[in-house]
Amino acid sequence: DVKVTQSSRYLVKRTGEKVFLECVQDMDHENMFWYRQDPGLGLRLIYFSYDVKMKEKGDIPEGYSVSREKKERFSLILESASTNQTSMYLCASSGDRGLSYEQYFGPGTRLTVT
Amino acid sequence: DAKTTQPNSMESNEEEPVHLPCNHSTISGTDYIHWYRQLPSQGPEYVIHGLTSNVNNRMASLAIAEDRKSSTLILHRATLRDAAVYYCIPLRGNQFYFGTGTSLTVIP
């Protein structure tokens, strides 16, 4: 089975802190994604990556950056956390760049910024 | 972006069929239609996808209208474990655009 793991299920940080959210997949997938999920807004794409050291902005990249130094790992970075970044963060991976493929999601990290 | 319209919520009795509708009138000719669901406290999981023809798998069936402006996810016998939020997602390029989905309640 495909497994996508995220470093923490729950995280509490203070305003202004630098925050790292880690995601690891074990299926040698090329594509990895970071979403945030907020009540009433559904899932929104922050960043995605097609390959090592490659990244593309999603719909809401402001306030975030990403790093993909190894194929299996995709990190989301909040350079200076703010309270409006309190959210559920979901990582996903997929193995096909065609028009039909499925994404596998991790369990999510619930981040609270105080 | 191909926009979707889904009911906010639906209810079904256990062991009865459920039809979850989705309107996607602005879909392009090459957009696949994907369905995912999200169980409580979990990440979304893949259910089914299709392009033009109706599709079946072990979890569900997908009926796609001939003009592709709408589709319906069919759960043949709802179980309590099927209580989740169901997302209808036209795939544009390599990006998924999740809306707010339909929250399905299954009544014992």
Image: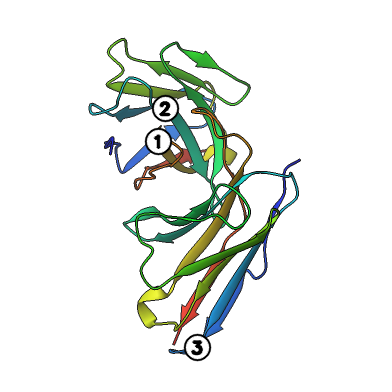
Residue at 44% x, 82% y is A81
The residue pinned by badge 1 equals B89
Quadrant location of the N terminus of chain A?
top right
Q: Type of residue at label 3?
A: Glu
Vertical placement of A37 versus B88: above or below?
below
Residue B33's disc number: 2
Secondary structure at numbered mark 3: loop
Front position among marks 1 and 3 = 3
Residue B45 picture quarter: top right
Name the amino acid type tagged 1: Ile
What residue do we see at 44% from left, 61% from top?
A36
Mark pair 3, 2: CA separation: 40 Å
Q: Residues within 10 Å of mark 1 (few under 14, many from 20)?
A: many
Q: Earlier in the sequence, mark 2 or mark 1?
A: 2
**Dot 3, how many residues are within 10 Å of its Cα: few (below 14), some (14-19), or many (20+)?**
few
Q: Are marks 3 and 2 on the same chain?
A: no
Q: Which one is in front, B93 or B35?
A: B93
Q: Secondary structure at mark 2?
A: strand
Percent coordinates x, y for residue A74 in the rendering = 62, 60
User: Mark 3 against mark 2, which lies toward the viewer?
Assistant: 3
Residue sitting nearer the eye, B53 or A80: A80
Q: Which residue is mark 3?
A: A17
- Label 1 element class: strand
